[in-house]
């Protein structure tokens, strides 16, 4: 699939206990939340959203190539936040 998926699968396979956010510890608490094992905070292996230089940078580059754009950004806090960031960037240009 990709480096991020591979890294997450490796982390899930080799981590017995989680001592980071979020507090569900990767446990699937209901059928609705089956992605819980993949819900991790920014750790050493999975890069940093504010300054991507590894796995997330590679993901953003792959998304940009796929969508035939110059750049892309990964957001984890939803569409509304992405819209606010876009509007904020536009405001600086105007």
Image (spheres, rainbow, N blue to C red):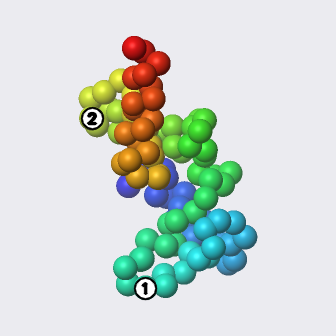
Q: Is residue 13 visible?
A: no
Find disc 2 in the rendering and name its residue: 67
- Residue 93 spot, x, y in % from top left: 42, 15
Residue 92 is at least partly visible in this image: yes
Q: Residue 58 or 77: which is nearer the viewer?
A: 77
Image-based side of 82 in relation to 14, left or right: left
Q: Which class describes the residues within 10 Å of circle 1: few (<14), some (14-19), or many (20+)?
A: few
Q: How many residues crowd around disc 2 within 10 Å: few (fewer than 14), some, or many (20 or more)?
A: few
Task: Residue under label 1, please give it.
Answer: 30
State the image coordinates of residue 30 (x, y, percent, origin top left): 43, 85
Percent from the top left, x then y, of residue 89?
Answer: 44, 25
Please state which of residues 45 and 24 is positioned toward the viewer in this rendering.
Answer: 24
User: Is 24 situated left or right of 81 in this image?
Assistant: right
Q: Quadrant of the C terminus?
A: top left
Q: Does dot 2 land on a helix, a strand or a loop?
A: helix
Residue that extends furthest to the right in the rendered view of this protein: 19
Find residue 75 and report its horizontal and vertical position in percent: 45, 46
N-terminal of the pair, mark 2 or mark 1, is 1
Q: How many marks?
A: 2
Q: Is residue 62 left or right of residue 25?
A: left
Q: Residue furthest bottom?
A: 30
């Amino acid at each position: 699939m990709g480096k991020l998926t591979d890294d997450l699968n490796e982390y899930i396979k080799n981590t017995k206990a989680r001592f980071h956010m979020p507090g569900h510890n990767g446990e699937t608490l209901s059928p609705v939340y089956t992605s819980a094992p993949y819900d991790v905070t920014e750790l050493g292996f999975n890069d940093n959203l504010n300054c991507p230089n590894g796995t997330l940078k590679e993901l953003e580059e792959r998304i940009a190539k796929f969508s035939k754009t110059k750049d892309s950004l990964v957001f984890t806090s939803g569409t509304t936040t992405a819209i606010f960031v876009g509007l904020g960037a536009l405001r600086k240009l105007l």
